[in-house]
Amino acid sequence: MADLVEIKGVTHAYRTPAGALPVLRDLNIAIPEGKFCAVVGPSGCGKSTLTRLIAGLMKPDQGEVWLHGERVKTPRKTVGMAFQNPVMLEWRTILENVMLPLEIVAPSMPKAQREERARKLLALVGLSGFEAKRPSQLSGGMRQRASLCRAIVHKPEVLIMDEPFGALDAFTREDLWQLMHKLRAEEPFTALLITHDLRESVYLADEIIVLSDRPAHVQYRMQVDYPINPRPISMLYEAKSIERLAILRDQIEIAQGRNGGAH
Ligand SMILES: Nc1ncnc2c1ncn2[C@@H]1O[C@H](COP(=O)(O)OP(=O)(O)OP(=O)(O)O)[C@@H](O)[C@H]1O
């Protein structure tokens, strides 16, 4: 399978008043088309920087970022993004918010067709009947469902998610995890997920990458070879998942410089 996202030898430092802050060092990541990659690592190690580089919002000092065989040099319209706090436009309805990327990426698509696509996705995430509501009329979980629809409505070449479930309560979060697998089955996408939640990474991803502390490089890679459709939440309680979680926790502690000390 061809790699859709390729991060090749990426090194980057921010210029700050206090001097250069090295954030990434010789980072190499490849995500094959259709795969779901989760990235975990110590706080502040450079995970969000990685998402900005893939979206073309900034250029690395060294190395290359490739998307679909094209070198990323400028902001990419065809990337789908979802964040912890879904930024929704209050003056637009939920349906109009979800349609927004199509207006930018496919302006020639007839409005009826854009609407049909947005309605289909809203139905898929259980938001039929809420199309005409304003964002503030929805719960946090519902807003995040709508934001996921908005992130994939234009069939992005890659779906980038930065802690999208971080602000939700545990039950809503698990609902949304299951929803991700449903969406993936219906609307296949290639995804990069930044998360602090190791269970989330094991439940959602095909591959988990543990980044070292700053300047971040790939410290550890784990394949999650569990069928994705279905992938029941109960898989997290299976011995293999518990073992995976223990390995990941140790890796995070190593990345934090604690060398697998007390849990
Ligand atoms: N525009 C910027 N200018 C200067 N420093 C920055 C800039 N953006 C981020 N940083 C710094 O670079 C480091 C990496 O930031 P980044 O947001 O990529 O980390 P992160 O792993 O996503 O963090 P967290 O886990 O806390 O969300 C941090 O120390 C941050 O303060």
Image (cartoon, rainbow, N blue to C red):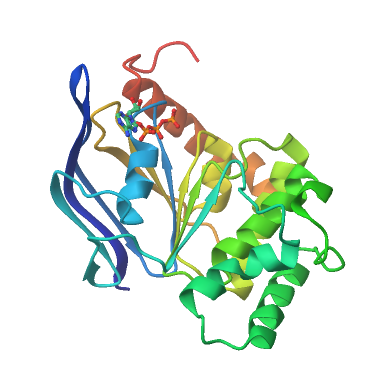
**8 lies above or below 20:** below
Query: Does residue 73 appear anywhere in the picture?
Result: yes
Nearer to us in this view, 43 or 221 = 43
**Which residue occupies the extreme front position in the image?**
91
Residue occupying image coordinates x 63% and y 74%: 186
- Counting the numbered discs, the total is 0
**Left or right relative to 131: residue 105:** left
Residue occupying image coordinates x 38% and y 27%: 44
Q: Position of residue 85 (x, y in %)?
A: 61, 41
Query: Does residue 188 appear anywhere in the picture?
Result: no
**Which residue occupies the extreme top position in the image?**
262
**Left or right relative to 175: residue 104:** left
Q: Position of residue 196 (x, y in %)?
A: 51, 33
Q: Position of residue 157 (x, y in %)?
A: 41, 70
Nearer to us in this view, 42 or 93 = 93
**179 lies above or below 3:** above
Quarter of the image where one finds residue 102: bottom right
Q: Position of residue 171 (x, y in %)?
A: 77, 40
Residue occupying image coordinates x 74% and y 61%: 94
Quadrant where the N terminus sits is bottom left
**183 lies above or below 243:** below
Residue occupying image coordinates x 69% and y 49%: 233
**Left or right relative to 216: residue 111:** right
**Which residue occupies the extreme right position in the image?**
129
Ligand 1 rendered quadrant: top left
